[in-house]
Image: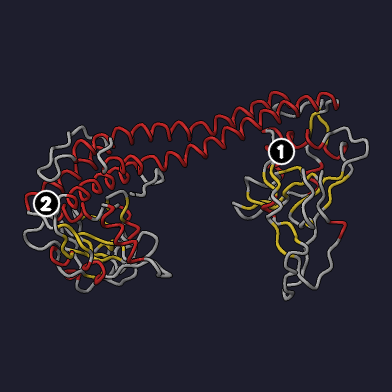
């Protein structure tokens, strides 16, 4: 079954789907396969050179310059090439990424500039009497990708060389049908860019392709619409929760707000065990990592083993009911807090996480504080108090945390707010879980549709 996802662009999905349908129908029609070497000249490797910004020679097209079925010429660098003629790009050249994450990705050169292609690319040129667009259409299909995937399997670094590329098999059809297939796939690509060109009817044995591709286009459009709605829903439910926190807690400090240090007893730092040469203890004791605390979530699995030669410190042991805050983290997560609801197994506080110590008769409930510190008003205070030389990593001091301004409310009012926001949070979590499930179903839907198309069940 064709494996596609909406993490790909709409154009990539539909072009690959249409090409797969066409070459599946060719196979069912009894077309004989031949090696790519029967239809194309010997593959050629690109030119090895360093990219240069100054225009001192031809442009050097690299794998990264092939984007969205186009070469982004304005960002292509230059290079020094003594004999550019040997590597010069020409119309109908087909370029292959031969290594890396995009191994097998192809590009058909339509309007070349004065440019050569780089060494991590392979060039293929059609032989006389072979349509380049037909070869390129095949290189978009699942019939091609299944062979490429098989060739890449077992390699530490994905790669395909010229010999493997030439040995791939492709249906051998007459030149009229080659042109018709190439033109058909080009129209499919153009339709994803907004063209209103109709799909032409292909000759035998491909008469069914037009109807199948049209149905898949219609269904794919509906799937994409559902995908967009699903994606748009996530920030909306988050915004609802934030708006509720603002409404119930207050949008900014007023005269009725007090410093955190008047509401709690203290904040303690965690432990940083230093013993670089010590082996780990296995699963006896662990020390939390900073990733254990995010907004409202405590993940006890985020820990590292305590070095074997160090004794655990019971004073730092994490217990049920602890209120934790991330002291050093990314800009978005610094100051993130969470309540420990279940006693984790033998874990200790790390030096990048604070633990709050509440007074016996504390006027603030930990569960209320959890919601307050996630409200926009307090997040703004935390972000203003965080410091750091890195643009992505920040740190907030104990003094800055203790000086945060919080609203004063009686415990009864705090409990009512917590109950309301907890219920709202549960509904948001439920919506997000449903979104994740829907995403998986959407990703599986198009391959299922294509499978039905091939079986004549649409």
In the picture, measured across the screen, residue 210 lies left or right of residue 220, that is left
Where the C terminus falls, by quadrant?
top left
* 256 over 105 or under it: above or below: above
Q: Which residue is mark 1?
A: 381
- Visible in this render: residue 73? no
Residue 211, image x and y in percent? 20, 35
Q: Is residue 25 left or right of residue 394?
A: left
Calculate the distance from the C-alpha at mark 2 to the C-alpha at mark 1: 65 Å
Image quarter of residue 272: bottom right
- Say what secondary structure mark 1 lies in: helix
Looking at the image, the residue that sits furthest to the bottom is 277
Which callout, 2 or 1, points to the residue nearer the camera?
2
Disc 2 vs disc 1: Cβ atoms closer than 8 Å?
no
Percent of width and height locating residue 212? 23, 38
The residue lying at 21 percent from left, 59 percent from top is: 94
Which residue in the protein does label 2 denote?
A: 178
Q: Count every numbered label the image shows and give the total.
A: 2
Please tell me whether residue 161 is drawn above or below residue 198 in the rendered image. Answer: below
17 sits left or right of 90 in the view? right
- Any part of residue 127 in sight: yes
Looking at the picture, how far across and down is residue 170, in whole percent? 19, 59
């Amino acid at each position: 079954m064709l494996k596609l996802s909406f993490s790909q662009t709409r154009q990539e999905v539909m072009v690959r789907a249409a090409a797969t349908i066409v070459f599946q129908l060719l196979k069912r029609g009894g077309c004989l396969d031949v090696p790519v070497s029967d239809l194309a000249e010997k593959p050629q490797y690109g030119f090895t050179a360093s990219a240069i910004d100054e225009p001192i020679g031809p442009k050097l097209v690299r794998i990264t310059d092939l984007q969205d079925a186009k070469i982004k010429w304005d960002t292509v660098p230059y290079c020094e090439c003594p004999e550019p003629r040997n590597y010069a790009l020409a119309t109908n050249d087909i370029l292959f990424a031969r290594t890396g994450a995009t191994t097998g990705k192809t590009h058909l050169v339509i309007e070349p500039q004065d440019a050569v292609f780089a060494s991590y690319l392979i060039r293929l040129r059609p032989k006389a009497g072979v349509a380049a667009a037909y070869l390129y259409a095949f290189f978009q299909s699942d019939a091609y990708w299944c062979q490429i995937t098989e060739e890449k399997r077992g390699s530490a670094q994905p790669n395909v060389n010229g010999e493997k590329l030439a040995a791939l098999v492709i249906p051998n059809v007459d030149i009229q049908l080659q042109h018709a297939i190439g033109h058909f796939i080009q129209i499919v690509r153009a339709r994803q860019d907004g063209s209103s060109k109709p799909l032409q009817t292909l000759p035998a044995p491909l008469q069914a392709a037009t109807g199948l591709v049209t149905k898949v286009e219609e269904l794919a459009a509906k799937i994409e619409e559902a995908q967009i709605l699903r994606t748009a829903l996530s920030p909306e439910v988050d915004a609802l929760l934030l708006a509720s926190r603002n409404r119930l807690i207050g949008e900014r400090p007023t005269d009725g707000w007090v410093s955190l240090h008047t509401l709690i007893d203290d904040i303690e730092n965690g432990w940083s065990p230093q013993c670089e040469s010590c082996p780990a203890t296995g699963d006896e004791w662990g020390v939390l990592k900073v990733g254990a605390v995010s907004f409202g979530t405590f993940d006890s699995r985020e820990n590292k083993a305590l070095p074997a030669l160090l004794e655990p410190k019971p004073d730092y042991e994490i217990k049920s009911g602890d209120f934790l805050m991330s002291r050093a983290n990314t800009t978005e997560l610094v100051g993130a807090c969470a309540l420990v609801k279940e006693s984790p197994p033998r874990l200790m506080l790390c030096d990048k996480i604070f633990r709050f110590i509440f007074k016996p008769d504390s006027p603030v409930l930990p569960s209320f504080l959890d919601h307050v510190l996630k409200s926009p008003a307090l997040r703004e205070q935390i972000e203003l108090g965080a410091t750091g030389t890195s643009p992505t990593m920040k740190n907030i001091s104990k003094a800055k945390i203790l000086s945060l301004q919080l609203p004063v409310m009686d415990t009864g009012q705090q409990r009512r707010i917590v109950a309301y926001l907890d219920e709202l949070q549960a509904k948001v979590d439920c919506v997000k879980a449903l979104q994740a499930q829907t995403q998986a179903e959407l990703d599986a839907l198009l391959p299922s549709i294509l499978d039905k198309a091939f079986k004549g069940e649409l």
